[in-house]
Image (spheres, rainbow, N blue to C red):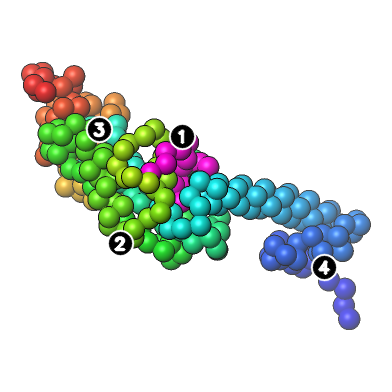
Amino acid sequence: MKAATAREIAALIESAPTDEVEALCSRYADDPRVQVRKAVTSALRRHQREAEERLRVDALYERMAELGGDGVVVGVDEVGRGPLAGPLTVCAVCLPPEPHIMGLNDSKKLSASRREAVAAEIAEVAIAIGIAHVQPESIDALGMGIALRHAMARAIEDTGLDPDAVLIDGNPVHVHPRERCVVKGDATVACIAAASIVAKVTRDAIMVALDAEYPDYHFAENKGYGSAGHIEAIRRLGLTPQHRVSFCGNFLETPALF
């Protein structure tokens, strides 16, 4: 039988499933060909990164079980407290203990494409997902604190579950009798991380859709936050119905009275 070429071996190593990488690298560890040696080194590094990622994600699930117990556990997170425009969005997610979703993390630590991919997997795996939005006019009328509590309550209700534990990112909200708040929970607790990602992807999609309606404000790029271009558009064109008037007084010639 003809011996495999260096290119063929390198391709074999690069395409190997995770559980076969170590054996293949061991088999070709002493191969003197440069292309094979590079493939072995690259594959071992990739395997190490994947192993570290599995350990990181496993820790998120362990923390979820530790804080939530064995019952129905719902994680809650929000996105959109700070923008000048667009809704406040809250998501509640209940995850099964298995399978573990690789990539779960604070949504801000993921690229947009990675967030969307992980959000799609969450949608497939999750036991339940609840989402609630508070529109700008309601934020102006209620204030952010009340708006956030209302949205969290609605998102939890939208899951259709009666949770034994509600794990919320950040400080106490007093929205549920069985809530437990976890500072930096979006980076340390699986169900909160999932809620963080789904909330971000959902709200970003809303802002991209609004960009088509209000192109001068560049909502697809700034997601409603106060970028220089967004503030310049407010000063030049005024506010849209998607703006939080109470957030924008500093950028108007005649500040709104709130």
Asked whether residue 27 is in view, the answer is yes
Q: Which span of residues is magenta-colored?
A: 179-201
Do tag 4 and tag 1 residues touch (Cβ < 8 Å)? no
Q: Is residue 252 above or below residue 101?
A: above
Task: Determine the secondary structure under disc 4.
Answer: loop
Name the foreground residue: 181 vs 110. Answer: 181
Dot placed on the residue nearer the N-terminal end, 3 or 1: 3
Q: Which residue is mark 2?
A: 160
Residue 146 belongs to the span the image colors magenta: no
CA gap, disc 2 to disc 3?
24 Å
Task: Determine the secondary structure under disc 3.
Answer: helix
Q: Residue furthest bottom?
A: 1
Task: Determine the secondary structure under disc 2.
Answer: loop
The quadrant where residue 145 appears: top left
Q: Which residue is mark 4?
A: 5
Q: Which residue is mark 1?
A: 183
